[in-house]
Image (cartoon, rainbow, N blue to C red):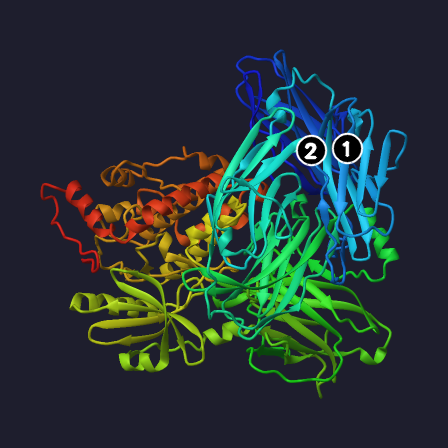
Amino acid sequence: MAFESKRYILGHVEVEEPLQDIVTDELSCVIFECKISDCTQQSISSRWYKDGKCIEPSRKFKISANGKWHRLQITTTTAEDQGVYIVLLKNYLGEVFSKANLFVKSIKENHVNNDVLYLSPMAKHFDVVQHLRFTKVLVGDTIELEAMFNCDALQDYIWYKSNNLLIPNERMIVLNDKRTTTLSILCAKESDTGIYHVISKSEYGIASSFASVVVINTDLNTLNISEIVPSIDESLPDELEVNEGEDVRLICKASYDVNTIICWSKNGARIEENKNVVTEYYNHRYISLRIRNTCLNDTGEYSIAVRDKITGQIDTSSCFLTINDTPRGKRCSVQVKKPLEPTVTCFGTKISFTCSFAVDDPRFYFVVWYVGHFRVERTNHRFHMMHNGGDFYLVIKQVEPGMADEVICELRKALPNRKSILSISTATTLTIVPPAIIESETKLNKAITRRNIFYNTNLKLEISMINKNLDEYRIHKCAVSSNGGKKNTCESFMIITYCRLDDDNYYLSVSNIDDDIHVERMTVHEKSVRGESPKVPSKLVVIEWYETQTDKSKSGWYQIELGNTSDSFVQAGVSSLPMFEIKDPPLEQIMKFRIRAATPLLNSEESRVCILPAGKALRSLKKNCNLSPMEDFEAMFTKTGDIIGCGAFGSVVLVHDNRGEFYAAKILKTRTQKKRDTAIREYEMMKRLQHPKLVELYDSFSARESFILVMDYLWGGELFDRIVEEEHIKEVDVVPYVRQICEALLYLHERKIAHLDLKPENIICLSPNSRQVKIIDFGLARVLDESHITRAIYGTRDYVAPEVLNFEQLTLACDMWSFGVVTYMLLSGVMPFSGDSWPERSANITMANYNYHESAFKEISDLAKDFVDHLLVLQPEKRMKASVALNHQWIVEGPPGGARAGHMKRAQENLKSYLANHRARWQRAGNVMIAAHRLRSYVGGQRNVISADRESPRVT
């Protein structure tokens, strides 16, 4: 949460990187850092303050200055450390300060979330109409904090300062009416600095607002004026498009306080707010213009002006909004089956939101979440997303200030070419309160319920050294499909919802527990067992519960049932123990289990259940994909009329079979024998490939002048497009994508297959809500036989290895070089090998001449650069192999700073520019330019020149 990103000037010194707000757990270590420019022999003194009180160095508070950096380290935080922290920098020319907030979450039980209240959905949302504003005043002035709510309060408003109850006195006066509360603090003191929080209760629930207050004891003539000038730190997007009837939010990041006037205009005319057009504020750092139920007349240029009332300083930003006609005939019947629940929590907690939609056909539906100013479409460093049919879950890993207020889940229908339309949405509120409010409401309000939710943040793997046979010891193996189910009228003991979030985290929710049986605790642990491939161990997840029973007749055996997307359950087996196992659960996909009392099996003392997810069982039933006549394609598939992509090879169109399943059909032109040989080679290559990170071939058809390959329909778009569009992306979010590319290359290289055309447009995302990517286009792939020297002139320029340009022997290491180029670009948005022309760039490639001077790399860890350095190695035999890359520290552990480091805003801007300028060239450059490099490099007859055909490259 990098707030206050503008630069503040102190004489000839600039605050280049101000303090950042921090949300942390109790007993953790926290470091505040402020970076200034070169001091140029000036003596800079610094003082640190917490809520206006000067901090003296001690064992707990360590203060240091190292060149440009001024640091405060809190070795062990407690709840009392929550507040506003300020560093005051001073020299003989003047003073400047930087401030940040620290939010501390109290530690309770590690495995149960006790700081969350889930309220029943109400007919009306209880919201804040006017939030508290960040306030900065001088000592002796008056502090005014005012909040307004949309419903009448049932009792007096409750005020807190840094989590401590605020008691009004002769200097602190609170004035209330039914919907408004005002706190006035007379003769402000430095000790009045802090985080202020107000809570209101109505018949519709709880609402709150919070803001920080800074009281300065200095002379404004010495405090640099730039500190109090409002600024827009992140501009509005240049352009934005939505469909008619949808809501839109124009969001920018800005520095503003109570003295800031914010004005929106459209086409130069000031906008008057109404029920459909409102300004929203998020934690005094983000501002949004919300336009509800847009129409075609809302198209135009929108501008925001941020002006300071005292200085008159102003900053502006603009965005052109286009409202498109809603596509007709694309909507399906959709209803909200389970709305979102209003949620009350504290800073730093881990919470989840759940909603369900009744959709006739859930295929190609996805959701977009809005949490405060955050837009969430898939798992990242702040959120986990998962789904199952019409059920969608969002897990917030750590509640931050900017997440307060409205939470929205939009269900969208995907259309070809990465377009979508809004089907329906559900909304609720996320209210952040001090911990004392949670405790008091739990005791007083019986309507408030707690949901038993368990998470794991550091899952340890239990490694099994033997090959465990899952059929032994009477373990029931169940491969369950989503078709049908057996109805059972018995009452459920409980329903367990489980989801594997990533390698180290899971989600587990327990509900519908029998009143006679109390589950004391539930554990989840993993074992690694040998899988189908010795190099890829399988995961065995064990879910076990411990109970205290009052009805002894219900003890003993358990019937385990697995739910499917139609809310029915199928029997998975009977267990004699309060536990069951899941082998290789899919990532980010919800699995539901119903547990019932069962009759013991005859002549059996022990029975256990191991569930095999249906996807793995179905993958083994892959077709042989034998070539069929073109007439069969017309009988089996129907073209939708939607074109997914096209190029010199032909086109890719969207088709569906007789069951309604969608596929991508690659139609190749084979009018010449050379093109037909190329098509058959790609078909033979894809036929032998089967891996979750590679596009899969389902059917193939042939005629004299055409060839069709029917493959996965990947509707998530190109990976580089996703990186550009992802909000608040960090280095840690890139690692999962890089890991998957590496897994795909490992699979290929174990089979001696080189892809030989790894580039951005050949890395496609599975779906909008999924982080899974697949590598496509095996038209240039080759099996490399070590007994035969293979040379070739083809590939896509800027991505090919030096040995390709030099017409040397091709090896699997060619892919690893291209992999290094792609990773370099993901992290920076620019090509590693620069030059004003292709001859200059190709010369740099053949010398492995690259660097990390691009400014985007300032935010990237040395560990990531080390990963790239081991890939962009000139000698192929010294290049890092895929198996080694998968075990690199950066891939296994991520960046050292985790989610708090590695902002990639600059990389996104670079990548957006690159895609706009170079995408059209990918299809027309490639091999001809590579051949030109060889002609230039080897003129003089040192070797025989082999010409390159762009569509059918020649291989020797």
Whether residue 630 sits left or right of residue 861 in the image: it is left
Q: Position of residue 707 (x, y in %)?
A: 26, 72
The answer to whether the residues at label 2 and label 1 have Cβ atoms under 8 Å apart is yes
Q: Position of residue 893 (x, y in %)?
A: 55, 48
At label 1, counting other C-alpha atoms closer than 10 Å, the crowd grade (few under 14, some 14-19, many 20 or more) is: some
Residue 647, quarter of picture: bottom left
Q: Residue at x 44, y 58 (%)?
A: 743
Whether residue 736 sits left or right of residue 918 in the image: it is right
At label 2, counting other C-alpha atoms closer than 10 Å, the crowd grade (few under 14, some 14-19, many 20 or more) is: some
Q: Which labelled disc corresponds to residue 144? A: 1
Q: Position of residue 756 (x, y in %)?
A: 30, 55
Front residue (pair 266, 316): 266
Quarter of the picture holding the C terminus: bottom left
Residue hosting label 2? 258
Q: Secondary structure at mark 1?
A: strand
Compute the Cα span from label 2 to label 1: 9 Å
Front residue (pair 243, 48): 243
Q: Which labelled disc corresponds to residue 949? A: none
Q: Is residue 927 visible?
A: yes
Residue 935, quarter of picture: top left
Q: Secondary structure at mark 2?
A: loop
Residue type highlighted by circle 2:
Val
